[in-house]
Amino acid sequence: MFTNPVIPGFHPDPSVCRVGADYYLVTSSFEWFPGVPIFHSRDLVHWRQLGHVLDRPSQLALDGVRPSGGIYAPTIRHHDGVFYMITTLMDEPGNFLVTATDPAGPWSDPIWFPETRGFDPSLHFDDDGRVWMCGSREKALKRYDGDTEIWLRELDLTAMKLVGEEHVIWEPVQRGGIWAEGPHIYSVNGRYYLLTSEGGTAEDHAIMVARADQITGPYEPNPRNPILTHRHLGLRHPITSTGHPDLVQTQDGDWWSVLLATRPYGGPVDGPLTMAAVRADSGYNLGRETFLTRVHWEDDWPVYDLVQPEMPAPALLTHHWPAEPACDHFDGPRLSPVWNHLRTPREPYWSLSDGRLTLRLRPQTLTERGNPSLIARRQQHIDFAAHTVLEFHPAGAETAGLALIQNDAFHLRLERSTRGLDLIRRASGEETLLATTAADTPRIWLAVEAHGQSYQFRYALHPNTWHNLGAPTDGRLLSSTTSGGFTGTMIALCATSNGASSSNTASFDWFEYRQV
């Protein structure tokens, strides 16, 4: 048996490819840098992060990108010893492709396709040696929001240019015909199969399939579409929003699919059970996560198993990777790949020396669409605890501390300032001081512990003498059901001079994250 999700936390839009007995997977990263985390597995269940595909500013410009803008829905493929990753930078025109011979990198600088528009591009390497690119876009004369189509065009790999005629091969057919997206094409037993998602990426998400004798179509829809959705399972099902899949065949011939889904959680709903009530009473703070399910074939159509929290594992030799330490002592030469920056860093505001992380205070703040001085990692468990120790001598309006971030308008900050230690809630752009205490020591321990949607912040002025700061905070503002967008909660170590010039720094000796 295995437990879903296989990659917990904010890891949406998974795409997978197999090279021999090795599996490689990428996910969306939106406004966070480096872009496109890449993972490696040998059993489809246990994954280790190799790094990121887009780890240089020359590859990824996220300056000023809106929350939930940036990198959407990458696709990874392997052909003749080369890895290909194609994706969309949503706030710029066109899609782009990068290549590598080693999935751990380095990956090339982007090759742009300005003649394309839309999002969710994918590649298909055909048996006859031809290569095709497909993608989703809203129609030029769209009738309503989400009136999309799937397009297809041949790609000349030598010239890295699209050639020949463009074909529109699919339009959405379910739920009023909205948001046909995330297309992938596969060759199976002499036929072409087009896999898409429709209905939007929330609770009505659904997977569709069509097939054709020629890659350019016409495509025949499966009469049993959708082949996977959880929208009929009710509002209390533990896994919702299933969609945006990618298929992979194991070396033993079995078929599996990775896909995104969400795990809503929160308190009980009082009154009539409606979508509005459920959304108001719960959330999915972890964002859209990567799940795994089995795929069978019947009558030459793929058939999906419903996605369950516990499922029979693939018939592959179990391969565990060494466990990552719960505590990062910042004693390596570079940051662990779990850490991210908010948008593209244009200057090195962080350093690792003497077994600590040091952040240089700069004017940028979390409330702006800039690149503040912070590093952040994903919340990956419903119940978790995070601890750190801060060394900081604030002056003026300077602050540093621990933050839980959904975006610039929705976050929680536990920050040290000249007046002490403050717990600040920011929702819809409005800030509320939830609690404050005097803390005049330069060294202070900070923590947050979450049990469901109850987030308790703590502090200590001496080791192991913890105090609660304020009452438990309602964590539902960290869910995209409240804030909008497509991302999950990020836990950050941050520092800012709040608009002023400063030469000051803030140091963190270590950071610990554990499931509780």
Image (spheres, grey):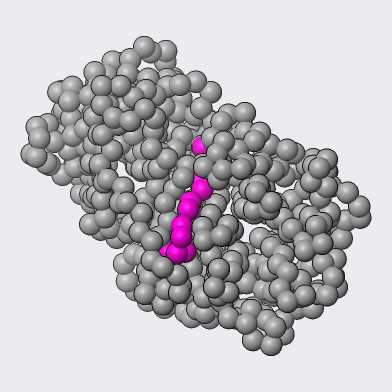
Residue found at the far bottom of this picture? 299
Residue found at the far right of this picture? 165
Q: Is residue 35 magenta?
A: yes
Which residue appears at 55% of the width and 39% of the height? 105
Q: Is residue 170 visible?
A: yes
**Residue 491's x, y, as percent?**
36, 43
Image quarter of the N terminus: bottom left
* Magenta residues, start to end: 34-45
Apparent side of residue 126 relative to residue 105 in the rendered image (left or right): right
The image shows residue 61, relative to residue 395, as above or below, that is below
Q: Nearer the viewer, residue 247 or 445?
A: 247
**Residue 273's x, y, as percent?**
43, 77
Residue 361 sits in which quadrant? top left
Q: Nearer the viewer, residue 186 or 365?
A: 186
Apparent side of residue 499 relative to residue 442 in the rendered image (left or right): right
Number of numbered discs overlaid on the protein picture: 0
Image quarter of the C terminus: bottom left
Residue 436 sits in which quadrant? top left
The image shows residue 230, relative to residue 102, as above or below, that is below
Q: Is residue 149 visible?
A: no
Q: Is residue 422 magenta?
A: no
The image shows residue 329, relative to residue 268, as above or below, that is above
Which residue appears at 36% of the width and 12% of the height? 503
**Residue 25's x, y, as percent?**
53, 55
Which residue appears at 25% of the width and 50% of the height? 514
